[in-house]
Amino acid sequence: MERFQKLEDLWDRGPLVLAIGFFDGFHVGHQAVLAEARRMAKARGAAAGVVTFSPHPASVLFPERPVQLLQTEEEKETMMASLGMALAVILRPTQAFLGESAEEFLRSLRAVPGLRGVVCGENFSFGAGASGGPGDIARYFAGTDTAVSVVPLAVSEAIGGRVVSSTEIRRLVQEGDMRRAGALLGRYYSLSGGVARGFRRGTDDTGYPTANLAFGRERILPADGVYAAFARIRGRRFPAVTNVGTNPTFGNDGRTVETFILDFDESIYGEAFAVEFVERLRGEIRFPSVAALAAQIGSDVQRARELLQAEALRGASSLAAGQS
């Protein structure tokens, strides 16, 4: 997937259909928008791409209250490529840009010579004070060679038939409800980063060596607690137990994400690493001794192993059903 930072970079790219939005998390609603962009692009003999923004516009307007996100910019790029996008324009919003009128933004879109289609979600807004919406896009391009498609908002029975949104997923993640967050995302919620040097307490004290994930500070973390998870490392996937929080038995100063990878004993310090959260097993507990903590971790590992084995079988069954 090609990456650009200005709409002007697209002027010699040929016929294009562009999906527009912030797309934090690329949940099932966002995926429907990109699927419509792919469909329209195929029908109009064009390439499908995305116009998105980084950082979040609200973080630019209100820097004292930065928005915590479901994905890093790098994770968004990987997701866009996996969803079949040929290119992405990642605009860097400034106070001046966010103060422009909705019509100014539409003029900059229309200036792209090869633009053959624009796709957005039903709740997409743009321009100063979020004054522009899908209806404005449709009216602006009416009578031109640029088609406009507005994708209805997705709803999910996992949240009682309510609208799927990044805001709702952030709330579920912060509550530790990884099952429902995953249902809205269409995949497990994950964190990725490098393996950082930790306290070595897992190795030296409890007998359960952990990989300490160096995650982006702009990321939403699940509620403090212990999770059954999958670890992705070196192109492979392993069952794991992940602790999120301050590890109160030892009294850490900050929150960490520490993962014990089952049936794995290789050195991975400094390597790329990701954790997929499947289900919260329990909250964080201050134990009276390291021995008591180690005993509880043993129980957590056994419970996680059973849960993840069942999870893997469900995934294999779903795959087989889809191929039959």
Image: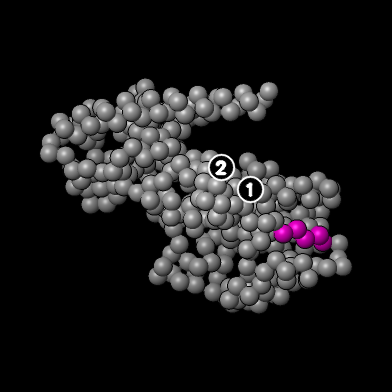
- Horizontal arrangement in the rendering, residue 301 relative to residue 271 (left or right): left
User: In front: 98, or 185?
Assistant: 185
- Horizontal arrangement in the rendering, residue 141 relative to residue 78 (left or right): right
The tag on residue 205 is none
Please name the residue that numbered disc 2 is placed on.
Answer: 186
Q: Secondary structure at mark 2?
A: loop
Q: In the image, is residue 37 part of the stretch drawn in magenta?
A: no
| Rendering coords of residue 310 (x, y %) | 45, 25
Taking the spot 58% from the left edge, 76% from the top edge, the residue there is 129
Taking the spot 63% from the left edge, 64% from the top edge, the residue there is 124
Please name the residue that numbered disc 1 is placed on.
Answer: 31
Q: Categorize mark 2 by other alpha carbons within 10 Å: few (<14), some (14-19), many (20+).
A: some
* Amino acid type of the residue tagged 1 in the rendering: Gln
Q: In the image, is residue 148 part of the stretch drawn in magenta?
A: yes
Q: Mark 1 and mark 2 in contact (Cβ < 8 Å)?
A: yes
In the rendered image, the residue lying farthest to the left is: 288
| Rendering coords of residue 115 (x, y %) | 79, 59
Q: Main secondary structure of the magenta part?
A: strand
Taking the spot 75% from the left edge, 58% from the top edge, the residue there is 149
| Rendering coords of residue 230 (x, y %) | 43, 33
Q: Quadrant of the C terminus?
A: top right
Taking the spot 22% from the left edge, 48% from the top edge, the residue there is 252
Mark 2 or mark 1: whose residue is earlier in sequence: 1
- Horizontal arrangement in the rendering, residue 320 relative to residue 49 (left or right): left
Give, as a single range, the part of the protein colored magenta: 146-150
Task: Examine the rendered structure and indicate whether residue 298 appears above or below residue 3.
Answer: above
